[in-house]
Amino acid sequence: MKNYSDFPSFTVDFATDDDCRRFLMEQKWGTGFICRRCGHTKSVKGRTWYYRRCQSCKYDESCTAHTLFHKIKFPLVKAFWIVFQLSTLKKGMSTCAIAQQYGIHQETAWFFKRKVQQAQSNVGEDLLLESIEVDETMFGRDPDSKGRYPGTKSIIQVAIEVDFEEKNGEIKQRIKRARAKHIKDFSADTLSEGIEEMIDDQALVTTDGWAGYENAMGERWHLVFNSDGGENFKKLHWFIFTLKNWLRGIHHKVSSFHLQKYLNEFIYRFNRRNIFSSSTSEVLKSMVKSAWMPYRHAIEM
Ligand SMILES: [Zn+2]
């Protein structure tokens, strides 16, 4: 797929369901056919041009079968456009906005968005490297929550990979990539799990003086900085502010149960904010490789 710098040029190349099917055919069988039933590698045209039929067992498979595009209840071309917008719009798109813009049922929009999120998670994120700052934040409403007592709020552990750039003669910190994890408490074990999952073990990790981190860091290279009312972690706090704003803004209600999926979606877009166009083809490819998702699975996962 070529790089699309804007939505209109994407819609020119993907204007019909058949345009999308051609893309799916190429992704699925471009490097060869393997029958899902019997493992045979020779096929002929199936029931229509976008089906392949196994020469041995006659199993007929469409280009959407066993992908996240299977059994969607609206035209494939709309699905492609939604993927483009979800992976490139700075703030993503709410289920309501998708339903409105594409004239589909809100539940249908929700279900499809869940699939896109799944495909984004399957692409995954690499470990953060070199210089990292870590902090936690709480999300939700609970007037009793104070300091590190969350009450009914959800806790999010956030890590950013930072470096420095010179701008107009001034050295400025800049965030390269980020990760975020929904965690259950502030214990050293929980914090340590998050660190392991998100950060390379050779990186230098800077945190505030929270005692939990002393034990969570183990053998890692660790720097402690007093937060000093946010003065020492400006970029990190900006990032946390932006993340929470987004969570509050376009997603009216993010339950604790689904929180990690929204964090993944945000991180996915954030880490690809400078490679705008390749992220769409990355998600589309991941959707072809990801297994079909029944509705019940979408609710429970
Ligand atoms: Zn077969």
Image: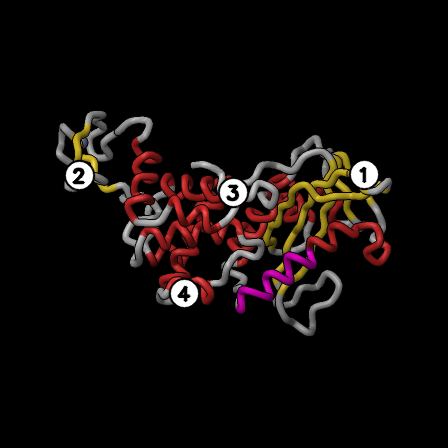
The span from disc 2 to disc 1 (Cα, nearest Å) is 58 Å
- What residue do we see at 65% from left, 51% from top? 157
Q: What residue type is labelled 4?
A: Ala
Ligand 1 is within 8 Å of the C-beta of the residue at disc 4: no
The span from disc 3 to disc 2 (Cα, nearest Å) is 34 Å
**Foreground label between 4 and 3:** 3
Q: Front-most of 107 and 195?
A: 107
Q: Front-most of 10 and 49?
A: 10
The disc, 4 or 2, on the residue closer to the chain's N-terminal end is 2
Quarter of the displayed picture in which ligand 1 can be seen:
top left
- The magenta stretch is 240-252
The disc, 4 or 3, on the residue closer to the chain's N-terminal end is 4
Residue 264 in the image: x percent, y percent?
Answer: 54, 50
Say what secondary structure mark 1 lies in: strand
Label drawn at residue 277: 3
The residue identified by callout 4 is 99
- Assess disc 2: are there few (<14), some (14-19) or many (≥20) residues with their C-alpha within 10 Å of its C-alpha: many
The residue identified by callout 2 is 60
- Assess disc 1: are there few (<14), some (14-19) or many (≥20) residues with their C-alpha within 10 Å of its C-alpha: few
The span from disc 1 to disc 3 (Cα, nearest Å) is 27 Å
Q: Front-most of 174 and 182?
A: 174
The span from disc 4 to disc 2 (Cα, nearest Å) is 32 Å
Q: In the visual, does 153 lie left or right of 25?
A: right
**Foreground label between 3 and 2:** 3
